[in-house]
Image (cartoon, grey):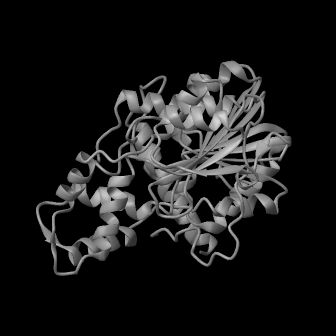
Amino acid sequence: MDTGAEARIVRQWAAIYDAVYESAEDTTGADFGGWRSSITGENYSETETAEWLDGTVDAILGLKPETVLEIGAGTGLVAERLLPHVRRYLGTDISATAVARMERDYGHHPGTEFRCAHADAGDLPAGFDVVVLNSVIHHFPGEDYLRRALTRAVRACAPGGTVFLGDVHSLPLRDTLRLCVLAARSRGERTAGQARDGLTALGARERELVIDPAFFPAFAAEHGLVADIRLKPGACDTEMNLFRYDVRLRPDDGTLITPSATRRVPWDARDAARLLADTAATGLPVTVTGIRHPDLAPPVGVLSALRRSDPAEPVNVPALLAEARAARPDGIRPAELSALAAERGLVCFCLPAVSESAGYDAVLASPGEASGTVAETTAGTDRPLINIPCP
């Protein structure tokens, strides 16, 4: 994509968010304007947004930053929670309205600065412990822009610093998300061929940048870093928790575990309590592979069946998905496993699948043994790792 097309798309997003933030001009504090599920079209509940915000802030503060650069800071959802814990904070956004709101609401904090700037701006200062791009890179116009923005984020880090990427949209699970959207919008029966055409049409209208987790290990290696990739920590059955993930681009400081270097145990339908007890008794760290996510299993299964169906076969996608969910498939939610591990004095890192799958891997370790994991480069893959958004 040429720079002119990139600039046009960035201007479009800036105009959209200027309008969103201007419509809530008198709002103070947490502003979730525009935060709607792409599945239902409805606003997320207070419980869902609070869980998302808590998980994001906890992840960033877990990196123990004293100085933070946040690129795409919006109106300061994350900033408000970080400011009491850091001595320097610079927030940037492409929306002038958002920047004015941040200056109004948070400019009185010492050590704060706010700028209107593109994510790939080349004139940002350096020396930050953590550079945050949270729930923003899906608005980037393409891979070239993404690479420039991430490269500049890496350069803005102090030695030993981390780039935190929140809410990255999963390319391997994008068709599964589209199936959920199709089910929410469908009315009655159609043929399997029509349903597949509907999924194709949704893909052709895709305006967001969607990224395979396998992109990040290779990018990190180009910059002398590693990629620590994790599922979102929330428990709510939302698009954010099911179809997005977080990435930490960071130095390998000796506290990170490489899953392939651990003992590997396939999940065999044990529940969370039994799984933790058995693995801890036989030695840590350990990577449990192929744990079924019970909230992802129904749409992944329906999508697979739909692809195998004769094009003329009548199907009712909403009914099929409802039936699959009602069957209550076995599995362990990542948030459940992580919470129970913490209760038992263990750390648990849940890793997103790099293929279309309802499974995930979990690395279990003793406290103090690890601060994260090293995502490994997938050798020889010829599949696209980033989509081309519709302009």
Q: Inspect this view and state whether residue 181 appears.
A: yes
| Residue 253 pos. (x, y %) | 85, 42
Closer to us: 362 or 33:
362
Residue 141, image x and y in percent?
A: 55, 64
Residue drawn at (18%, 60%), measured in percent from left and top? 186
Q: Nearer the viewer, residue 247 or 102?
A: 247
In the image, residue 308 lies at what x, y percent? 30, 76
Residue at the (58%, 66%) spot, across then down: 142
Up/down of 21 relative to 252, above or below: above
Quadrant where the image shows the N terminus: bottom right
Judge whether 290 appears above or below 4 on screen: above
Any part of residue 115 in sight: no
Q: Residue at x 49, y 35 (%)?
A: 272
Image quarter for residue 365?
top right
Front-lying residue, 9 or 302 = 302
**Residue 115, quarter of the rendered image:** top right
Q: Residue at x 35, y 46 (%)?
A: 37
Kindly give the residue lying farthest to the left in the view shown: 188
- Judge from the rendering whether residue 40 lies leftward or rightward of residue 140; answer left or right: left
**Position of residue 270 measured from the top left corner of the image (x, y, whole percent):** 47, 42
Question: Position of 107 compared to 177: left or right?
Answer: right
For the image, the number of numbered tags is 0
